[in-house]
Image (cartoon, grey):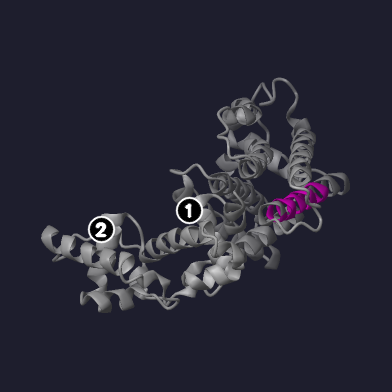
Amino acid sequence: MQDMPVHINFISVIIFIGIVLGLILSFFFIKKSYKTKSPNLYMGFLLLALALIMLEGWLNYTRYIFQFLSLTNFSEPLNLAIAPLVYLFNITQLNTKKQKLWWLHFIPMLFWFGYCQFFFSMPDEFKYNDNLRSMGLLLPYLETNVPYSGDPLSIRDYINTTTIIHIVVYLSIIIWQILKVAHRKKEKIFTTKDSTLASLRNSFYHFLIITVILVSVKLIFKNDVGDYMIFLYMTFMILLTTYHIMNSSDYFSNTSTLLEGPIVKYKKSSLVEERKEIIINAILHQLKEEKFHLNSTASLSGLAKSIHHNAHHVSQVINEKLNQTFFEMIAQYRVEEAKAILKSEFGKKLTIEEVAERVGYNSKSAFNTAFKKFTSQTPSKFRDS
């Protein structure tokens, strides 16, 4: 097989950044949501699918795929997972009922994964030729002695068309569902102030744009030559998601500390169980009686100082006894405080910004994010209900 020179440029670097960020974000979305089965779980799997599809595209674009021929078309079945994941992400926000038959949406993907085994079992020479053809490279093909094509039903050429139809059908259902909910709430989708509807509308726009780019690329370019344009927009989406997460995170609303890194194990800790009980009781006293969490500058070091214990030990006890980080614990207590205020007659007269300030938040968006994480509702929706 001929050695293929690697093709690295600015576009490949940008796409690679998107892949890395997508994989990191997917890990945290899935890790934080797999127990609660919240919409963010589907977002995590969606980001993972996008990142893997982009990875294959990046290997093709840079021509690294010729060094890893066994990975040829490895993400192709995931093309049929994108639309169902977008749909499930949307529908779980519009409807609080659990999706019992969610797995049915992935039957086309599973079928295609099974069918792709014919291709995956082909020798490297065959995959080498397939990559030459898909990239439009005018190089001589290798001779193969394989008597079959890896496509017994001759349907592989229709995967792009099938993917587009698949996405369009799901996007049509999604926008119908959004419009139906907007009508029920007497909201106009383009001017709605409902945060959930606005978020879903904006997500719909992004995937509509991806669909338009996908159709345009397949009409203009032969084979997979122009796919990098799709991956560039996916990278933009992932960067935008990263920015939104960083911008709305309540981590930045508190005094940060390096001690809040992921402390997985405390094998060398000098804390005995009796001491841990003393510390956790002191922490709970500060939260329940002294209302430590209502301070907008609440920090781990501040809590440790108030109970006269080492900050590292306080962080360890919170992790082990409450199975939370310091910031998760503070957010939970703030949300409980906010719920009590929103239920009261006095709270009905306050704006959401005022409620956020009363429970220690300097940012309305950070308050909304935390509140929705623990209640699956926005503060406004909780108060109305």
The correct choice, above or below, for 277 with respect to 207 in the image is: below
Quadrant in the picture for residue 178: top right
Compared to 13, does 219 lie above or below? Answer: above
Is 206 within the magenta? yes
Q: Residues within 10 Å of mark 2 (few under 14, many from 20)?
A: few
The kind of secondary structure element at disc 1 is helix
**Residue visible at 75% across and 26% down in the picture:** 155
Q: Amino acid at mark 1?
A: Phe
Residue type at numbered disc 2: Lys
Residue 274 % position (x, y): 11, 60
The local secondary structure at tag 2 comes to loop
Q: Which residue is mark 1?
A: 374
Q: Which mark is residue 200?
A: none
Q: Nearer the viewer, mark 2 or mark 1?
A: 1
Classify residue 84 as left or right of residue 71: right
* Residue furthest front in the image: 345
Q: Is residue 56 magenta?
A: no
**Taking 163 as reference, is 200 above or below it?**
below
Q: Position of residue 46 (x, y in %)?
A: 60, 46
Residue named by callout 2? 265
Q: Is residue 359 left or right of residue 132?
A: left
Mark 1 Cα-neighbour bin, 10 Å: few <14, some 14–19, many ≥20:
some
Magenta region, residue range: 198-213
Q: Position of residue 172 (x, y in %)?
A: 79, 38
Whole-percent x and y of residue 196?
66, 53
